[in-house]
Image (cartoon, rainbow, N blue to C red):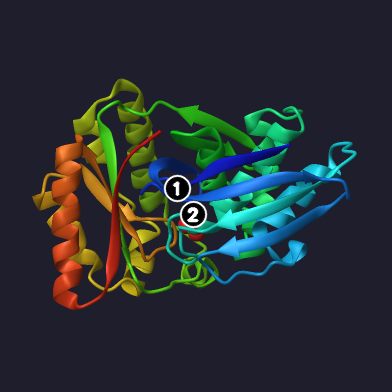
């Protein structure tokens, strides 16, 4: 009556898809062990790797789990252990991994009363606790895998998008912390029609490129004209990293989540590894420690 799961890291936003387009990493993630308990409710008995609250209502996994249990009759409770490999504030979906992992694991132990898509709103409650906004662009790919698009928030409609076979993600995490709530507060609440048109063109192009596995189209579409210009000023070395990725052969790059991580997409694992090297050089020169991951999108 227990389950051990891999709770994957995610990149969201993917450039022009602010708050709607995310992808799932297969080489970065946390581990969670969830056990049924005789006593009803949710406890978090152990968190290894990060200092985070154990109190259920203050922990994103706890809050997501409680949201699920409110909607189902369960004669038992659940205890959660979390082994964190993803640092909070890294931009690789740390809170999403815990929230998504909790509801995924509990759903399995309950005999899957909910479909994967139905788990997304529960996991969003964890995101709300973490950042003040119940966005789904990290939790949806963490639960459904691959690329996902939040077509609508009200009502929630999440669509799984094709992941091109040769597409790899490189993510560099400079060791500085940027809180999602802070990097959301620098965003402008209004955009001009001209910018909206540009962004919509790129988003349409990107979705089309992902389905048709057209890497040139993906490359031409990987731009964010709305959020990145405001947020990138919080990330040291951002412009240099972007330039170096393209030089190393990446299709394009952008801010991972709300930063400070930066991601690049590449065709082929070899190119993605070259991109990793070139990103690393920039932070070595600046003198900021970093970790870096190359991952297939699964
Ligand atoms: N879509 C969110 C943002 C992801 O960019 O603020 C961060 O968790």
Specify whether tag 2 is near ligand 1 (CB below 8 Å): yes
Q: Give the residue pinned by disc 2.
A: 93
Residue positioned most to the top: 212
Could you say where residue 244 lies in the image, as x and y percent from the top left? 13, 57
SS at mark 2 in the image: loop
Could you say where residue 82 lies in the image, as x and y percent from the top left? 59, 56
Residue located at (22% from left, 70% from top): 237
The reply to whether dot 2 and dot 1 touch (C-beta < 8 Å) is yes
Residue located at (27% from left, 74% from top): 236
Residue located at (62% from left, 33% from top): 157
Q: Toward the viewer: 139 or 182?
A: 139
Q: Give the residue pinned by disc 1.
A: 10
SS at mark 1 in the image: strand
Residue located at (53% from left, 49% from top): 31
Whether residue 154 appears in this view of the structure is no
Q: Toward the viewer: 26 or 10?
A: 26
């Amino acid at each position: 009556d227990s389950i051990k799961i891999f709770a994957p890291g995610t990149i969201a936003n993917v450039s022009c898809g602010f708050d709607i387009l995310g992808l799932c990493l297969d080489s970065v993630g946390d581990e969670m062990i969830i056990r049924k308990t005789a006593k009803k409710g949710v406890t978090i008995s152990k968190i290894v790797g990060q200092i985070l609250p154990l109190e259920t209502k203050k922990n994103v996994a706890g809050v997501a789990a409680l949201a699920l249990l409110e909607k189902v009759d369960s004669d038992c409770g659940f205890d959660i252990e979390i082994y964190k490999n993803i640092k909070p504030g890294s931009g690789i979906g740390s809170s999403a991994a815990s929230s998504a992992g909790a509801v995924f694991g509990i759903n399995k132990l309950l005999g899957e009363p909910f479909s994967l898509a139905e788990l997304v709103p529960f996991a969003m409650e964890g995101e709300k606790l973490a950042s003040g906004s119940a966005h789904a662009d990290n939790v949806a790919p963490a639960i459904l895998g691959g690329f996902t698009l939040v077509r609508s928030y009200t009502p929630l409609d999440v669509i799984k998008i094709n992941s091109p076979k040769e597409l790899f993600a490189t993510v560099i995490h400079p060791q500085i912390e940027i809180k999602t709530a802070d990097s959301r507060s620098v965003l402008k609440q209004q955009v001009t029609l001209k910018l909206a048109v540009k962004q919509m063109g790129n988003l349409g192009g990107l979705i089309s490129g992902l389905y048709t596995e057209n890497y040139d189209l993906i490359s031409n579409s990987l731009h964010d004209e709305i959020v990145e210009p405001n947020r990138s000023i919080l990330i040291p070395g951002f412009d240099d990293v972007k330039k170096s990725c393209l030089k190393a052969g990446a299709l394009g790059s952008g801010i991972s989540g709300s930063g400070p991580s930066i991601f690049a997409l590449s065709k082929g694992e070899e190119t993605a590894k070259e991109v990793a090297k070139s990103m690393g050089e920039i932070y070595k020169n600046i003198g900021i420690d970093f970790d870096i991951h190359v991952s297939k999108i699964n």
